[in-house]
Image (cartoon, rainbow, N blue to C red):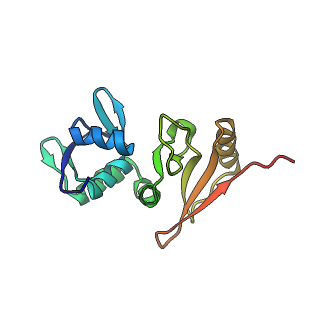
Amino acid sequence: MDKKEEFAARLIGNLLSSNSKKAYTLSRENFYGEKSNEKISYSFCEGFFLFRYKGMKVYSGKKFLSESEILSKFTKIDKRFLEKYKVYKNLREKGFILKSGSKYGADFSVYEKGKKPGRAHSTWLLSCINSSEKIKWQEFILKNRVANSTKKQVLLAVNDDEGNAIYYEVNWKKV
């Protein structure tokens, strides 16, 4: 599908959703969004990606939002939006599928190329971190324990000052 085929999504509070035919097609074919209450609901990262590359128009009330207005609203609600979006975009463009990882205490649950949500389990629990940010050992251990108990690996995306992400996979080793 190209960008010319536009579709509408509504931003109400901190919820972004659409009930358009294209939203259902993108969800079924490319695993964007989650079905809920006869609509497709999107994370801000999914929504912004769809806005930029798949023709999503975002409305708030009756007003179409520009890119800068969307960025302003998303970053006001989620202070880490830009940091997470850079990683989301990078991995989505490489063929990975990213879903919310909030129930695991992560930013995303990541499916390997070719694995489909609902038909296979995700491989990684991904947390996005700035290179200048410090992470507490307890938080790091907790991420590992949750990943291990759900048969996933921890994946850390460390964003540097130049806008690049370096990925680190954490594995358990039995001795």
Q: Position of residue 44 (x, y in %)?
A: 36, 47
Q: Position of residue 24 (x, y in %)?
A: 28, 37
Residue that appears at 56% across and 41% down: 105
Q: Is residue 104 above or below residue 157?
A: above
Q: Is residue 37 above or below residue 175?
A: above
In terms of depth relative to the viewer, which is nearer, 66 or 113? 113
In terms of depth relative to the viewer, which is nearer, 136 or 56? 56
Q: Is residue 75 above or below residue 163?
A: above
Q: Is residue 167 above or below residue 61?
A: below
In this view, which residue lies farthest toward the bottom? 162
Residue that appears at 32% across and 48% down: 47
Q: How many numbered marks, from 0 up?
A: 0
Q: Position of residue 52 (x, y in %)?
A: 28, 58
**Which image quarter: residue 14?**
top left
Q: Position of residue 134 (x, y in %)?
A: 62, 58
In this view, which residue lies farthest toward the right? 175
Is 111 on the left or on the right of 1, as rendered?
Answer: right
In this view, which residue lies farthest toward the front? 114
Residue that appears at 49% across and 69% down: 164
In this view, which residue lies farthest toward the left? 62
Residue that appears at 55% across and 51% down: 127
